Image (cartoon, grey):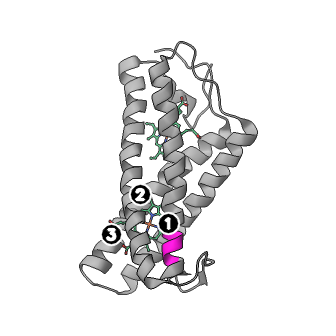
Amino acid sequence: MQEPRHQYGLSARILHWLTVVMLLLTVPIGFAMTYRGSDLKIWDATTNTLYSSHKLLGFLILLIVVARLINNRISGTPPDEPGMKKIFKLAAHSTHHILCLLLLLVPVTGWVAISMLPALNIFGLFSLPAITSPDQKLSRLIFDYHAYLAYALLAVIAAHIAGALFHQFVLRDGIIRRMWPSRSSS
Ligand code: HEM
Ligand code: HEM
């Protein structure tokens, strides 16, 4: 398997894998809390802790994604691997753009919805700043958008991971090393 010629910078790689870890926590917590709260109607300390954790982690993901976009702007991203087919370049670039857009839209809709409810408190310790005035009726609709956009994000992530695995095991071009946490030997 060949080594890729370029690698993302250390900060870009850290922010990429940090986002992955945060999503691995945020998404299951999102499903668990709505199952306990909305479906089972259990509104106890556990449910509240799950909601607070989800809101806080989701908000941190928003900050990380903004940091990542600024970092990409300042440091730039590595050029595409030479010899990569145009169709694969197009697929990869469009997937990355859609991922970044959804990683902004999902937390922002969550934040707007809890501002409208309002339910901004985290662990009874502090509150996130409100970004809209209260409107309980509209908050329900925005929560629905939040859920649909989160499902869309999961679908695009699945396509992104399938693409990375396709490069690794079918094309065997070693492209995963471009984003691997450790330094590439080339
Ligand atoms: C990338 C970040 C985020 C992801 C991937 C995400 C994902 C999800 C998912 C999968 C659900 C369950 C949807 C359902 O099946 O009903 C959910 C619900 C929810 N999320 Fe997020 N979320 C994120 C960020 C946020 C943020 C930043 C907030 C608020 C600050 C937030 C607040 C909520 C709330 C309150 C619900 C419950 C909605 C309801 O009762 O229908 N989320 N989220
Ligand atoms: C789970 C959530 C994931 C998200 C949200 C995500 C998001 C992204 C984004 C937005 C980029 C574009 C680079 C940038 O703008 O910084 C990227 C690049 C990349 N990701 Fe992920 N990723 C995820 C998981 C994974 C996984 C599990 C793998 C490996 C199996 C992976 C491998 C890569 C590789 C190799 C690149 C560089 C592609 C290139 O430009 O050649 N990603 N990812």
Question: Is the CB atom of the residue marked by disc 2 within 8 angstroms of ligand 1's nearest atom?
Answer: no
Nearer-N-terminus badge (1/3): 3
**Label 1 neighbour load within 10 Å: few <14, some 14-19, many 20+:** many
Foreground residue among 69 and 6: 69
Tell whether 94 sits left or right of 140. right
Examine the structure image and report whether residue 111 is included in the region drawn in magenta: yes
Comparing labels 1 and 3, the label whose residue is closer to the camera: 1
Answer whether labels 1 and 3 touch (C-beta < 8 Å). Answer: no
In this rendering, the answer to whether 118 lies above or below 89 is below
The three-letter amino acid code for the residue at tag 2 is Leu
Foreground residue among 120 and 52: 120
The three-letter amino acid code for the residue at tag 3 is Ala
Q: Give coordinates of residue 154: x percent, y percent.
A: 38, 50
Examine the structure image and report whether residue 61 is included in the region drawn in magenta: no
Q: Which mark is residue 149?
A: 2
**Residue in view at x 49 percent, y 44 percent:** 98
Calculate the distance from the C-alpha at mark 1 to the C-alpha at mark 3. 19 Å
Nearer-N-terminus badge (1/2): 1
Comparing labels 2 and 3, the label whose residue is closer to the camera: 2
The residue labelled by disc 3 is 32
Res 49 visible? no
Question: Is the CB atom of the residue marked by disc 1 within 8 angstroms of ligand 1's nearest atom?
Answer: yes
Question: Which residue extends farthest top?
Answer: 83
Q: Which mark is residue 11?
A: none
Q: Main secondary structure of the magenta part?
A: helix
Q: Which residues are magenta?
A: 110-114
The residue labelled by disc 1 is 109
**Label 2 neighbour load within 10 Å: few <14, some 14-19, many 20+:** some
